Structure formats: structure tokens, C-alpha cells
Amino acid sequence: MSNQSGIKASAALLDAYRAFTIDDGARTMLVKIENESLEPGEIIKAEAGYFDDAALLAPYVTDTEPLYILYRTDRPTTASTAATGLVLISYIPDAAPVRRKMLFASTRNTLVRELGGDRITASFFTTDKREITPDGLRKFAEHDKVSQPLTDEERALRSVREVEATEGFAGTTTRKSHVSSGLAFPISQAAATGLAGLNGAARGEYNLVVLEIDVQNESIELAKKAQIEEPTHLHSMISTDQPRYTFFLFRHTVGDVDHESLVFIYTCPGGSKVKERMLYASCRAAIVAEAEAAAGLKVDRRIEAGDGSEVTRESLIADLHPQQQETKRVFARPKAPGRRR
């Protein structure tokens, strides 16, 4: 991490930035460092389009003077607002005086913090003014594999996929030792009691506990508990438009042996909100750890699905007893040969 320069944004910069962000016709705003302060430069109106408007910067980009450029995209920062995002371009040419280069390099994070990073959806650093052109901006976009910088929602969706890939525990039976579950939100008393009932005095009263995240209050709550006869009933118990954590005590028979297996089911419908998907994806491993540590449960299998309708008796047995299923296929009685003539 670079050292901070101690330079702050001036009141004039903050006022200019506010005016820039509400002016839909403005494409870029320049920011300079003058007299040990971040100061506003020119605000340039949009003319041709996202990429082509980069040509308007040519008179302001020199071979020797560093510059910050706030470049407005044509896309909103989120799906729920019309506010467009900004690309922060940090231009520090090689021919600039050493002190100026060090000053701009160490002040970039301060600029983002002072202005608020919610509108800045992408950034890049360059020492070559040829990259601050329509062609340079296109290459930057191609490098990021997008036609324009990602919106917050698109970046959040990508983060969801990364979190799910990192924690991808579908089908795993490995148990980890946890000193602390690392759960971000507290579990309500009702939720804790519900989980404990799967392994305590209430055992037999219900075999299903569904948990939800209260996003507003940032807590884990009991959505419902019930006694169901068949896994096909999960569909009516689990939300079809929001993610859920479900603990299901599955009683079944394989061969002549009766089994009772606790299955953790993480459901995440495709139409659920991005923020919810992020929260549920990042907390699911900690939820299992908390249930095992606090409620004394032993999760035998962890699976994930779009919704409860994807979970059936056959799929659960195949997940819980893969060896028996494979043996059944391998040692299936062969068909009798046909009569020879």
C-alpha cells in the first residue's frame, strides 16, 4: 500500500464534483494538485460518445504534468438508480518531475476517499498519454473483457460467482475444526432453538428447519420449522424467490439398513436480489459451522440447488450413498441370453 501524502480535497473541488455528478451533459472532470491541495480542473461536456469523447482530453494531457481524470460512463452504477458511473484515470507521465509523480501516486486513494468511491466503478493508471484516446480507452475496455466498465450490480454478480466457487462445498462431507464459526450476523434465539431441536428434546417434533437472513437487521432468523414426510415437500417449505438455508433430517432406507442423515441445503433462486445472493453465499459455510458448534449437529451432506423442487428422494440418496448406488449399477443382474435357434 502506498503512503498517503496528507493532501486533502479543497472545498472548491467538492463543490465542483457535486455539480459534475448531477450534470448529465458532462463527460469528464479534471482534478489537479495545486498548493498542496486537490483542486478542480476543467469540466468537459459530452459530444460524440463514451469512447470517442476521450479525444476531447487531448489539449489537457501533457508530457510532463500528472493529472486525475474522472470520466463518466453511459451506464448507471446500479440497476436501481439512474446515476452513471465514473472511471478514474490516473495519468502520471514518465517525464514529470519526480516529486510530482510521487505526490500524485500517493494521493490517489485520498481522492477516492474524499469524493466517495460509490460512483467510481473502474480505474486505471497510465504513464502514456496515447492511452488517453478513443483507441486507448477501447483497449482498456477490452483488457477488462467488457465493452464498458462493469456496473456495481455486474461486479456484485461476478463476486457472487467467485464466492460460490471459492466456497463451493456442494457434495462435500469434509468437516472442519472451528474455534469460531466466523459468522457475520448473530443467530436469533428462535433460530438457535430451532436448530437445537433437531438434536435435542424436540427431536421428533420436526425434521426441517429453514433459516433466512434479515438483511435490514443483519441477523439470522428462523423462517420456519416443520415435519415433512417426503423431500418433495421441500418445494412448499422453501422460498422460490429468495435464498435460504435449510437443515433437513432425512430418514430413509437403503437396502435393509435404516438411515437418518442431516442434510444442509443452500438454495439460491436465479431471480433473487444480488445483495441477498452475496450475503447468503458468503455466510453459508459459517452457518454450518455455527450449527455444528452451537447446536451439536453433525451435517452429513451439504448440497445446493436453485430451489426446493430440485431436491428429491432419489437425488438425496444418490448424494448420501454414492457407493451403494454405484454397486447397484455394477452388480445389476444381467439379462438372460436369448434362445438360440
Image (spheres, rainbow, N blue to C red):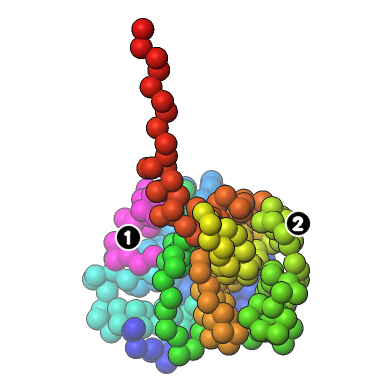
Rendered location of residue 145, percent (x, y): 41, 51
Badge number at residue 129:
1
In what quadrant of the picture does the N terminus appear? Answer: bottom left
Q: In the structure shown, which secondary structural element does the residue marked by tag 1 occupy?
A: helix
Residue 173 quadrant: bottom left
Which residue shows up at 69% across the image and 56% down it? 230
Q: Foreground residue, 213 or 273? A: 213
Question: 75 above or below 328?
Answer: below
Q: Residue furthest top?
A: 341
Q: In the structure shown, which secondary structural element does the residue marked by tag 2 occupy?
A: helix
Precedes in sequence: disc 1 or disc 2: 1
The stretch of residues the image draws in magenta is 124-145
Label 1: few (<14), some or many (≥20) within 10 Å? some
Quick check: can you spot residue 291?
yes
- Relative placement, left or right, of 279 versus 8 is right
Mark toward the viewer: 1 or 2: 2
Q: CA distance from mark 1 to mark 2?
A: 60 Å
Tell me which amino acid carries mark 1: Lys
CB contact under 8 Å: marks 1 and 2: no
Rendered location of residue 309, percent (x, y): 67, 51
Rendered location of residue 156, percent (x, y): 54, 63
Badge number at residue 184:
none
Question: 159 above or below 289?
Answer: above
Q: Foreground residue, 104 or 183? A: 183
Rendered location of residue 88, percent (x, y): 46, 67
Residue 140 among magenta residues: yes
Which residue shows up at 42% across the image and 36% down it? 333
Q: Foreground residue, 43 or 138? A: 138
In what quadrant of the picture does the C terminus appear? Answer: top left
Q: Residue furthest bottom?
A: 6
